[in-house]
Amino acid sequence: MSAGSFPKDFLWGAATAAYQIEGSPLADGAGPSIWQRYTHDGRMMVAQGDTGDIAADHYRRWESDVALMRDLGLQAYRFSTAWGRIQPEGRGPVNAAGIDFYSRLVDRLLENGIAPMLTLFHWDLPVALDDRGGWLNPDSADWFADYASILYRALGDRVAHWVTLNEPWVVADGGYLNGTVAPGHRNVFEAPIAAHNLMRAHGKAVQAYRAIGDGEIGLVVNIEPKYPASDSPADLAATARADAQMNRHYIEPALTGAYPPELADVYGEAWPEWPADDLQLIHQPIDFIGINYYTRAVVRDDPQSFPTRSAVVPQAGATYTETGWEVAPDAFRDMLIAMARRYPGMPIYVTENGAAFADPAVAGPDGVQDGQRCEYLRSHIAAVGEAIAAGVDIRGYMAWSLLDNLEWSLGYAKRFGIVHVDYATQRRTPKDSAALYSRIIANNGVIDA
Ligand code: BGC
């Protein structure tokens, strides 16, 4: 179906994030992150009490991991840098050993023909900054731009694709509203402020890049398209609130300079008046938008549910992943087409897409037969092909994830990798989905059986 629709220079890759794979969180002078604290504070906020202390041990196995990427035929690798490795205190002194780690990684990727896409923030804020209020402190935007500039200067001659933030919604909603991810606050007044400062940080980091770098820079958002459960005005309004809170809260100010009006209704007295200058800062010209897509949601009105007064309606007959997410490739295609209509001229990368399905803890003699993940990849890559055929400017696709890893509060039990990790031995085994993905890459998007 998607045959022939992918442009010749389309970038096929895989994505990871520092805290989820690296391990060795305090090695070589690194400062601790809020994930280090969150996983060690005794509250058992992560399933099974899992921590990122070892993770997939990528910090020590990066060389063989790059060889693995080469063997899979990856053309791009999206990874994140741990802020605390670069600046142990989050501000001020630079830790040369931290920069060296990522510099060596970038060199090795390039030697293997793999384009690095570097995410500056994938949720691991240094503890020293959290102690100053973290994203609630308006200075956080300057801290972030300073940290970003250190990396632009150190790696900008070799890294052409930059991402400011990964999924600010998760940080504001999980980190400050529901407490399900670090730093684990539950405060409705904090969430809009954290979200706003994250977006200001994005704006300042883009501004700083224009003064230093000459590649491309963008923002990565998670988009979960919301569908009304019925045509009732109550369900339609609930759907608009859910969409504003999760999706439009971030992409809209970045691309249009305004917050969705529904947010005042969602947050009520916790929604402040924002200075016009801030919105201008957030609305920096960017080179692409990165979209992470996993699922859609069918939404109904639910007055009891805070703060969006909406609930997700389970779909009879649908397939669900291990994280309870509906498999919905058509919604992916339709969302990409809708994005292109809403924000014309904005190039798109699919910066994450993938699924957790139950894989064994140890790979068998025939590897890991992950047929459901294969089907997920096939149908979602076909959806990208259909969106391109419909005229959407999509420049690349990054599978989530290269490796099984720490799935945040769900720990190691949920596996998203196309490569299996045996956590007892750190042995890597490419799953059937990795073999399928290699063939798709080799055929530039043509999907075999
Ligand atoms: C994040 C990843 C995460 C994945 C699956 C995205 O929200 O960027 O870090 O592992 O989805 O939940």
Image (tube, grey):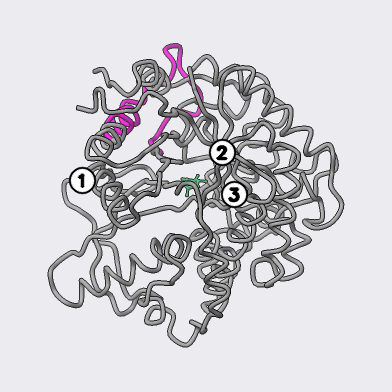
Q: Which residue is mark 3?
A: 122
| 188 to the left or right of 55 | left
Q: Secondary structure at mark 1?
A: loop
Q: Secondary structure at mark 3?
A: loop
The response on whether ligand 1 sits within 8 Å of label 3 is yes
Q: Residue at the top extreme?
A: 365
Is 380 inside the magenta-drawn segment? Answer: no
Q: Where residue 77 appears, x then y in whole percent?
A: 54, 31
| Of pointers 3 and 1, the one earlier in the residue sequence | 3
Is 377 inside the magenta-drawn segment? Answer: yes
Q: Residue at the left extreme?
A: 231
Comparing labels 3 and 2, the label whose residue is closer to the camera: 2
Q: Which residue is mark 2?
A: 161
| 402 to the left or right of 424 | left
Query: Which residues are drawn in magenta?
Result: 356-379
Which quarter of the figure has residue 230? Answer: bottom left
Which quarter of the figure has residue 275? Answer: bottom right
Q: Disc 2 and disc 1: Cα gap in Å?
A: 36 Å
Tell which of 257 and 132 is nearer to you.
Answer: 257
> Do the residues under discs 2 and 1 have CB atoms within 8 angstroms?
no
Q: Which residue is mark 1?
A: 318
